[in-house]
Amino acid sequence: MARQHPFFTPAAHGFVRVAAATPVVHTADPVANADEHIALIAEAGEQGVDLLVFPELSLTGYAIDDLLMQDALLDEADRQLGRLAEATKDAGVAVIAGAPVRHDERLYNCAVVMANGCIRGVVPKTYLPNYREYYEKRWFSPAADELHDGAGVRVGGDVVGFGTRLLFHAGNRPGFVFGVEICEDYWSPLPPSTRQALGGARILTNLSASNVVIGKADERALLCASQSARAMAAYVFAAAGWGESTTDLAWDGQASIHEMGACLASGERFAMASHLIIADVDVERIGLERLRTGTFADCARREESDVGFDRVLFEARDAGDAADLIRPLDRFPFVPDDPARLDQDCYEAFNIQVQGLMRRMKATNGERIVIGVSGGLDSTQALLVACRAFDRLDLPRKNILAFTLPGFATSEGTKSNAWDLMKALGVTGEEIDIRPAAEQMLKDIGHPYSQGQPVHDITFENVQAGLRTDYLFRLANHHGAFVLGTGDLSELALGWATYGVGDHMSHYNVNGGVAKP
């Protein structure tokens, strides 16, 4: 019963469920294409999707050449847009479909935005490819500056906003703001989605009919990832697939959803059935990252004379019942799943640590360090870094003064590991038993342990941690060295350290930026 609480719905935590659709294409048949769309809209509604993106010219097909100029086709496409708009009402989904739209005796390649049972706005394509295998300027006019927001176009029986400066905002869902661009637009040096993001869009969408050649899928994925990272946004990409004309080109139906550079979902390429890919994008996180990154706001202010947008309001579906989050969640977020990437990351992390320590040694004219070695992971990593830094600086490893400092709970196994490591690396190893000093301190402060009582509280633990650090600092003074820290980023983030004179203290900590998996 508790799972039905609104807390357990992703929408309550700033997530918007988006989907990219890959319908089977019926060339020059708006009715059949509309049927495919309506089935996918219904499926998306059942799965709680808030925003659904179809490919470019999805209602007619892209590669139909001069058929795009036929009144019969254009009239039917216009009628079917009304059907699609009606379908959004029951499904509770905002939908973006591709269709040719006539306006002022010109034809435009458009994205038609529908929600709440009606058409909300029409965005024409800005950049028309007219090179290699593309001839769009034969049929379409590009979006122009005179097509400003507020201009009206009659489509699907309604007069709605028409232009490249429309943003669509769910009035009942903070942060649910999206912009639209079409295929070639994001191949341009300055994609329209860049200005859309500066204008407040947190979700960027791309309706595409990009044909496929060997290697092109990687390039499209790179563009989606880079645009979502640079614009600090989510990016939903939907490309045409099975059923497009095969006159001289082929299509693979590539679809992907990215968020700030990371791929959340990607679809099956070369599939022969209509399908969706779905992911929950975190628009709240996007907003927070934009707040934290001053350059985003600075750029928006600098470009403010050019990013004036009209916001078209619609109502998104209610948060609804509890639902599972649809997005990849790494059990070990700091450790890549790909072995090659893991090797690369470990190589870079280790050498960053080594370079940092080398620079500190050079800046301080240091020739010795003191390090506490417990036999655990953190001190092992720090000691390996120290050895590599000393080797590269042509300093003898004997100048690495490594101390194991056994206490009340130190096992023979841990201590022997520390000694084996120090001997194997050829550093100067010594052992100082801190138990007598700890017992004296516990006695001086009247702790129950000093009277034979088995009290192992925070005082008992911190006396040992503090003494280890105290010994290391005094040893550093004594030997003209500095203390190399071993505490890692995870410990510091969780507060798993003894504050004050404790194990978070050092003169220089090489593990301070390294997470512990």
Image: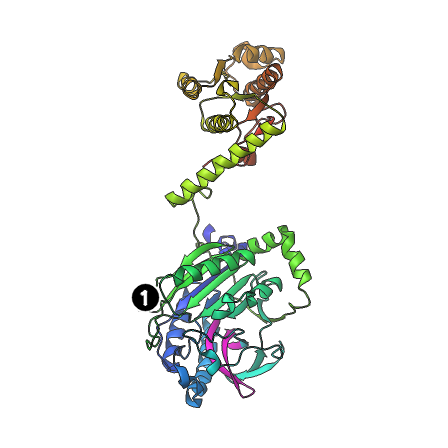
* x 42%, y 78%: residue: 59
485 or 140, which is in the foreground?
Answer: 140
485 or 452, which is in the foreground?
Answer: 485
Magenta run includes residue 154: no
Quadrant position of the C terminus in the picture = top left
Inspect this view and state whether residue 68 appears.
yes
Compared with residue 475, is residue 23 higher up or lower down, i.e. above or below? below
Inspect this view and state whether residue 172 appears.
no
417 or 326, which is in the foreground?
Answer: 417
Q: Main secondary structure of the magenta part?
A: strand
Percent across and percent down for residue 15 are 51, 57
Percent across and percent down for residue 138 are 46, 82
Classify residue 7 as left or right of residue 324: right
- The range drawn in magenta is 95-119
Percent across and percent down for residue 287 are 59, 56
The residue pinned by badge 1 equals 271
Compared with residue 288, is residue 363 higher up or lower down, i.e. above or below? above
> Element type at marker 1?
loop
